[in-house]
Image (cartoon, rainbow, N blue to C red):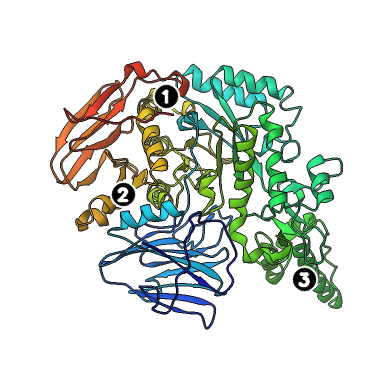
Amino acid sequence: MVKKYVFGNPFETDAVTAKIEISEQTGGIGCGSISTENGFCFRYQMDRDDVIYGLGEANRGINKRGYQYISKCSDDPNHTEEKTSLYGAHNFIVISGKQNVGLFFDYPSNLTFDIGYTKQDLLTVSCERADLYLYVITGESAYDVTKQFRKIIGKSYIAPKYAFGFGQSRWGYKTAEDISNVVKGYRDNQIPIDMVYLDIDYMQDYKDFTVNPERFPDFPKFVQGMKDQEIHLIPIIDAGVKIEDGYDIYEEGVEKGYFCKREDGSDFVAAVWPGWTHFPDVLNPAAREWFGSKYEVLTDLGIDGFWNDMNEPAIFYSEEGIQEVNKAIAAYAKELEGKGSEQVAGDDEGEDIMNNANALPGEVRSKMEQLQNNPEDYKRFYHNVNGKMVRHDLVHNLYGFNMTRAAGEALQKIAPDRKMLLFSRSSYIGMHRYGGIWTGDNQSWWSHILLNLKMMPSLNMCGFVYTGSDLGGFGSNATRDLVLRWLALGVFTPLMRNHAALGTREQECYQFENIEDFRHVIGVRYRLIPYLYSEFLKAVNNDDLYFRPLGFDYPDDRRAIETEDQLMLGKELMITPVYTQNVSGRTVYLPEEMKFIKFMPDGSIYEEIMDKGTHYIEVALNEVPLFIRKGKCIPVVDVAQSVAQIDMGTVQYLGYDGASYELVEE
């Protein structure tokens, strides 16, 4: 059962698509208590055994108890345990215990979930303004509650089948030759691959919807040449539009008033990769349609997939922020001048300020450090929403959603009969209808394999089914064993992409010794694609989950509920990736009898039936483990070098004798 409550004057986020009548609050909301005296605050006294699921892309565990989380889409690449905000804002939680209740707080600005952080048994959800919709969902189980929520927020995005192939990315592929060398590295070593991603260096001066003609002299021919090798090129699109005379996107946006404004009506200016930029006002339907239409510039060149980035939106610094720093420097210079010292000069463009940073006092350096993603900047620009100017910080968490919505709606018009790949860094619930997400700029840390694993079911709960992380880690230097272990998890995530940052160790699979191990692990992915894509389609079409916590399937098994390093996948599998360095395997818990499967490097498949209980399984770096549930089976095929080459004539079924499987295809 779903009930909808309204507080104050909520902003219409379009997160929920179902028509639900507003309920009276005369008898409360059925759980917890609510105060609207100083903003909004929901309080719930948790039982000792209550589990709190949800929050999508959030830090720490599957059970969110014991910490504080703030829904505030944030550009922060250091995902350490103390971080309270990441790139997404997914305000849905499930209380699972004596009662099973889901709560969706439809509120587009900062929202704090204190889940036993301040007081161990108290859950509080609070925000500054009591202007929101609250959806309360009751059900028989946490799983039931989640499926009800999925139904009211609309069908999830369906990625094309090729997007289940392996993809290689790196910030630093600058030229057509660089891309060709990557493809050659994979194809020559017979490592399957379907996609290569283009980061910001493919653009002309970091301008959206442009291609650098010197680096890619005949881009349409190059795109077609890649397609002839069954490689899809996936370019990045950033949120900021470069301010440059003669750049048609910029000039057209200014002319039509489609950029975010300052309070005085002038276009807001901030610096990102291109330098000074404007932000498209994607909360304005007309501007959203306009910006989305520009994706056709690249689809006309043969592109059939995109990833949207920097769309929190990220801000390096603003004109106002630079002015504040300059004032601080001027005050410091005046102080020095009064003492007979040489004046320290500032620069309106900010370059000299950065260069002279170490010579400045702590107070000035502190102001400089606050330039990037400064909360004050998010108060300095406005959106035109149905003729009303809305300050950005009040709707901050909707920007990434609406940028990807712009692309998704446009691509449906551009190619109505064709699925295109689309995913985003920043998101809010509702964006799941237009694209998937990747979990942003992680690090080459072993702990981030486990963080990747734990995020997956929580994201599914919030509608994001096409999901994945940067395999091998984006920042820091990867090691061979870390990449192999992470790939063995990535075998199962819908988005399987190796991505690394400029200046880090090269981590393409052919860069390491014993390349045959990488060939085998990625080959397992291709053997499983018919099954994985089938389960993906079932999850989308049935408003179900692709990944689930064990507690969803075994709600009466406390050990299963507390197991967070294993996941259920589809109705047939349990995955148990290894995420620790220098080990030969791991301990697993089986809530019931299952068949242990290992894909061996010689192409054979190891099978062993294991009883319910705790087991230690040996898993070498070049092996991929999984468990098949009792009475179930899955289809596997022969290895292929691309999704297009998968031969369904080679299908065989792996698992329990006599079991059957319903294969769903495009």
Instruction: Tell me which residue sits at (74%, 47%) in the image.
Output: 241
* Amino acid identity at mark 3: Ala
At label 2, counting other C-alpha atoms closer than 10 Å, the crowd grade (few under 14, some 14-19, many 20 or more) is many
- Front in this rendered view, residue 596 or 436: 436
Instruction: Tell me which residue sits at (29%, 47%) in the image.
Output: 566
Report the side of 585 relative to 164 (left or right): left
- Residue 459, image x, y percentages: 43, 51
Mark 2 vs mark 3: which is more N-terminal?
3
Quadrant in the picture for the C terminus? top left
Q: SS class of the residue under badge 1?
A: helix
Against 603, residue 18 (above or below) is below
- Residue 489, image x, y percentages: 37, 39
Report the side of 495 relative to 379 (left or right): left
Against 614, residue 623 (above or below) is above
Say whether marks 1 and 2 touch (CB < 8 Å).
no
- Front in this rendered view, residue 510 or 267: 267
Say whether marks 2 and 3 touch (CB < 8 Å).
no
Mark 3 vs mark 1: which is more N-terminal?
3
* Amino acid identity at mark 1: Ile
Q: SS class of the residue under badge 2?
A: loop
On the image, numbered disc 1 is attached to which residue? Answer: 515
Report the side of 296 relative to 570 (left or right): right
Q: Which mark is residue 565?
A: 2
Gap between marks 3 and 1 measured at Cα: 55 Å
* Amino acid identity at mark 2: Asp
Can the viewer see residue 62 in this picture? no
Mark 2 vs mark 3: give the one in front: 2
On the image, numbered disc 3 is attached to which residue? Answer: 328
- Front in this rendered view, residue 219 or 647: 647
